[in-house]
Image (cartoon, helix red, strand yellow):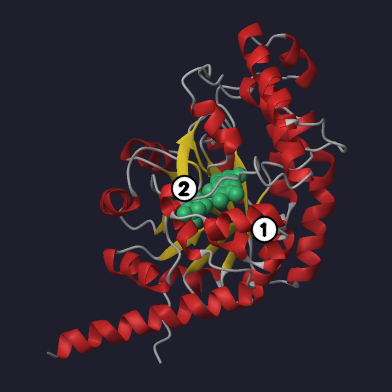
Amino acid sequence: MAHIKTPICDQLGIEHPIFGFSHSADVVVAIAHAGGFPVLGLARELPEEIPGLIEQVETRLAGKPYGIDLMLPSKVPQEASIDALKGALPPEHVEFVKRLRQHFNVVPPGKPSFFTTQVRSEALFNQQIEAVLDSRARGVATAIGLRPDLIAEAKRRGKLTFSLVGSTRHARKALEAGVEVLVAQGYDAGGHTGPIGTLSLLPQIIAMAGNAPVLAAGGIATGAQVLGCLGMGAQGAWLGTLWMGARENHTPPALLARLVASTSEDTLITRAHSGKPCRVVRSDWIDAWEAPDAPSPLGMPMQQALVGDVFASIHERDDARLIYEAAGQSVFGIEALTTVAEQMSRLVSDMDTAWERLHTWNLR
Ligand SMILES: Cc1cc2nc3c(=O)[nH]c(=O)nc-3n(C[C@H](O)[C@H](O)[C@H](O)COP(=O)(O)O)c2cc1C
């Protein structure tokens, strides 16, 4: 049996070239114990909960390496309150959402969450950055925006810096800012994404990365795909959607059912979630924003002020008709509820099978 490891595996002290992004602490812990490199997303956490969450994860990891990811778009206000933004929303949008709420019977969420209380602002980002720098995270990843000062400080504290890039322009900026690992995230990916498919993006990013390791992200759900990316020169694959099929993600049942039933065609890129193009699995709520009578979504952070409480409410109530989530074309890989350990062992054995297949062809 082959044991495929790349230089970044040795650099980070992990068994498999598989990087797992997740907002779930339980998924993060399970990925680390299964030999991958977990990356905890903190872009949706309440700022006051972040230090406690990091502490809890670090205790459970017992020294195993992990990373933290922040989303730091540049064009956000210095300070912002969600109430102030709500007061400034265009009446046409407010009216549209009011009609949708009535039509779909959306009730207000019962408890506060990031989506109902926070707005992406420089003040919020500074709080998040401080917590990340103070953590024992081995890696720090940033998406959408680049902060050269954060990158320099993270490196000074011995952390490996990653940046999610969707184009050669992004990659050049990241390298200029001193980022050490590029994550080439293609159009196929769940979450905020650009217009270039992973298979076309990856070789272009590798070509300009020089000695910097590159990871492939977007649309990856099988070990054969991981091996294919390694064959192209990537040092690993970065997966997000797949873990939503694991028990450790605590995916609401109706969302899990939607993900299991969905094919790659059931995901689409919309600005209706956050204001920036984001690939999600469709639901009646997302479809309503695609309808001819729908206004064009607002930008970030205004769109979140407009619909953040709807997102929170449909998740709280596990609303089977409306519930949606960021999800990639890789959703085809979610077939039933499973565990992270099972997913990892399947990815690794599928990588092996693909490796053996290549060898067989080579002998012919
Ligand atoms: C539910 C979900 C939330 C995500 N949130 C973030 C995020 O906060 N920050 C980030 O850098 N990437 C985020 N991503 C993107 C992942 O980091 C990763 O690039 C992507 O999931 C890879 O494509 P895949 O979904 O096809 O595996 C998210 C993805 C999903 C599915």
Amino acid type for the residue under numbered disc 1: Ala
Report the number of numbered marks.
2
Numbered badge on residue 266? 2
Numbered badge on residue 67? none
| SS under mark 1 | loop
Judged from this view, the residue extending furthest toward the right is 110
Q: In the rendering, at what x and y percent does residue 202 appear?
A: 32, 53
Return the residue nearer the eye: 332 or 305.
332
Q: In the rendering, at what x and y percent does residue 219 appear?
A: 42, 56
Judged from this view, the residue extending furthest toward the left is 364
| SS under mark 2 | helix
Q: In the rendering, at what x and y percent does residue 77 appear?
A: 65, 18
Query: Residue at point 67% right, 64% down?
Result: 27
Return the residue nearer the eye: 354 or 318.
318
Query: Which residue, given by chain and number where applicable, does mark 1 sit on?
Result: 137
Q: In the rendering, at what x and y percent does residue 332 appear?
A: 46, 61
Query: Residue at point 56% right, 71% down?
Result: 36
Q: Is residue 310 above or below residue 191?
A: above
| Disc 2/disc 1 C-alpha distance (Å) | 35 Å
